[in-house]
Amino acid sequence: MQLLAIVLAFAATALAATIGARDGCTPSAYQCAGDGWQVCDVSGTWQNAGSCGDGQSCQLQGPSIYCQ
């Protein structure tokens, strides 16, 4: 029973990694896009998440996004 749970957990992890890689992003990752930013959704697709104010641009520092 324990072995089955481990195998199922491994398979789910592998499937999630494959879905993210197939569409080009890993779920919960961020990236700058023009004067705003995007977040990767659970299906591995980039979604617009916000925009910076006038005269500012998106900056990515490590895993964090900020406007400057």
Image: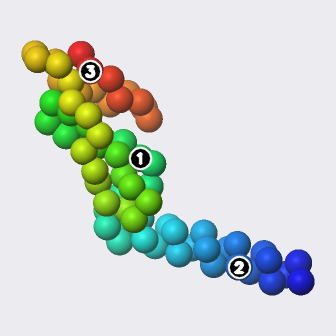
| Sequence-first tag of 3 and 2 | 2
Q: Under tag 2, what secondary structure?
A: helix
The circle on residue 8 is 2
Q: Under tag 3, what secondary structure?
A: strand
Tell me where residue 44 appears, x and y as whole percent: 37, 62
Q: Indicate the amino acid at tag 3.
A: Cys
The circle on residue 67 is 3
Judge left or right: residue 34 versus residue 18: left
Q: Is residue 33 above or below residue 6?
A: above
Spatial CA distance of label 2 from label 1 is 25 Å
10 Å neighbourhood of mark 1: few (<14), some, or many (≥20)? Answer: some
Spatial CA distance of label 3 from label 2 is 41 Å
Work out which quarter of the rendered image holds the N terminus and state it: bottom right
Quadrant of res 33: top left
Tell me if residue 61 can be seen: yes
10 Å neighbourhood of mark 3: few (<14), some, or many (≥20)? Answer: some
Q: Nearer the viewer, residue 42 or 57?
A: 42
Tell me the residue at 31%/60% (across/down): 45
Quadrant of res 9: bottom right
Tell me if residue 26 can be seen: no
The circle on residue 29 is 1
Tell me the residue at 39%/55% (across/down): 41
Tell me where residue 14 appears, x and y as whole percent: 57, 73
Q: Under tag 1, what secondary structure?
A: loop
Disc tally is 3
| Sequence-first tag of 2 and 1 | 2
Tell me where residue 66 appears, x and y as whole percent: 32, 23
Q: Nearer the viewer, residue 18 or 55?
A: 55
Spatial CA distance of label 3 from label 1 is 17 Å
